[in-house]
Image (cartoon, rainbow, N blue to C red):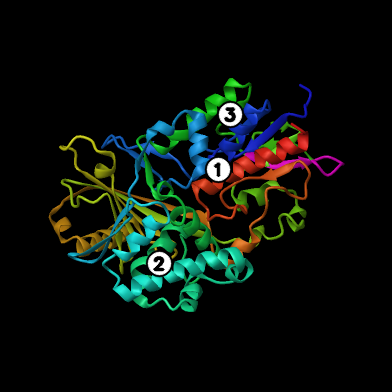
Amino acid sequence: MAVEAKDVVIIGGGFAGLSAGVALAERGFRVALLESKPALGGRAYSFADPDSGDFVDNGQHVLMGCYHATLAFLEKLGTRDRLIARPDLAIEMLTGPQQSACVRTARLPGPLHMAAAILRYQHLGPTERLSVLRAGLRLMYMRRFQARRLAQLSVAQFMDATRQNETARRCLWYPIALATLSEDPQLASASLFAEVMRLAFFARRRDSAFLYATVGLSDLYCEPARRIIEDRGGVVACRSIADHLEFGDDGRVSRVRLRDGAALQAANFIAAVTPDRLLKLLPEGAAGASSFAALTDLKTSPIVCLHAWFDRPVTDAAFVGFVGTDTQWLFNKRVIFGGPSDRPGYLSFVISGARDFVSRSNGELIDIILGDLRRMIPAAAKARLLRAMVIREKQATIATDTVSNLKRPATITSIPNLFLAGDWIQTGLPATIESAVRSGNAAAEAVSARVGA
């Protein structure tokens, strides 16, 4: 079959690849999407747990109201109604047993809703609350008027510059930074932190809302996106391992060669894979091109997640932050999603930026996390652990340190018909689902512009 201008191959079937594929399919492109794994989803997928009947995400993925591109994508897929929203942000923070305070937004227009939350946050004294608000305003000012300076600062350096004391950092700033940037605040980019804060907390009240999927993450977007692509004449193929890209005499990509020897031609190609996989697709020497020179310098950050089932509930809170422990966050799946009261408690625990933990054994990780749980919530000692499942994502996200952030590549490359997508490319956001969808949309726009569609 002859190659047409609107033929496009997308390598990678996560949020980035599927959002690009849907956008292009709706514009009349003939899409061939290749995913190396047996199922779609990339690094954001779910699976059914046969023992409990629960769906389990590979990590605890939380959407927020400020994920505008993601929510528009789900609306397009017809799955937006599978999300439940908690319009009033409420995060219980524990500094120890019976030492609880809540960051709870007020029912006021944004950003006053968040200012009220800070002013009522009991882990901070009155002077610290005012200092936090001043620092937040300073962060927004630097984002707008001193962006170059901010891009050189880590979160911790910004805290130094705004004289945030240890309590404010430990009980508020650093937990937010770890949750959103998945990186040690000593390394994490203050510029990325500012963008997160602007979108989530300095905008409309509804942008601060947490949204949870009532179905498995894969069910939320993978199959619906596949149907749209295939209904418009495209092909979505799992277990299709792209081995390398082949180039013509004109310097453009001519085809992608698969591991099984087959080849697929197209007019345009989108690589929606991780940086290490992209380097393997490129021919020797191509990594030296300006578009790809920094790929080998990009660092990654691991995340450890423990899914645990107990014989009883251990807390009524939906979402709990731990201060001063290795474990950072607890998600109470039974409270979030509801369900029969006779089912055992199902909790998920998260350690982001988990470089010191990702290589430890399952037994060690379970002991560490359950020790933190019993330290913070002593009633948990009475609960019997029925089952535990440790999931490690060794390269969960691109590192959000200041150097890596500045080296993230753009959508358009030095190869005219090769475009990049993925949460790790330069979107102005940390490596989140929203970043992935934005990158997919940008790649689709770039392909459309090149073709003149």
Residue 85 can be seen in this image: yes
Instruction: Point out which mark residue 437 bears.
Output: 1
**Disc 1 to disc 2, how far (Cα)?**
27 Å
Q: Secondary structure at mark 2?
A: helix
Question: Mark 2 is on which residue type?
Answer: Trp
Q: Quadrant of residue 145?
A: bottom right
Residue 251 among those drawn in magenta: yes
- In the image, 106: left or right of 197? left
Location of residue 219 with respect to 145 vertically, above or below: above
Q: Position of residue 351 (x, y in %)?
A: 38, 59
Task: State the extent of the magenta-drawn residues as a range.
Answer: 242-252
The residue shown at (46%, 74%) is: 159
Q: Which residue is mark 2?
A: 173
Location of residue 35 with respect to 106 vertically, above or below: above
Q: Secondary structure at mark 3?
A: strand
Identify which residue, 152 or 356, lies in the foreground.
152
Instruction: Point out which mark residue 236 bears.
Output: 3
Q: Secondary structure at mark 1?
A: helix
| Disc 3 crowd, CA 10 A, few/some/many (<14, 14-19, 20+) | many
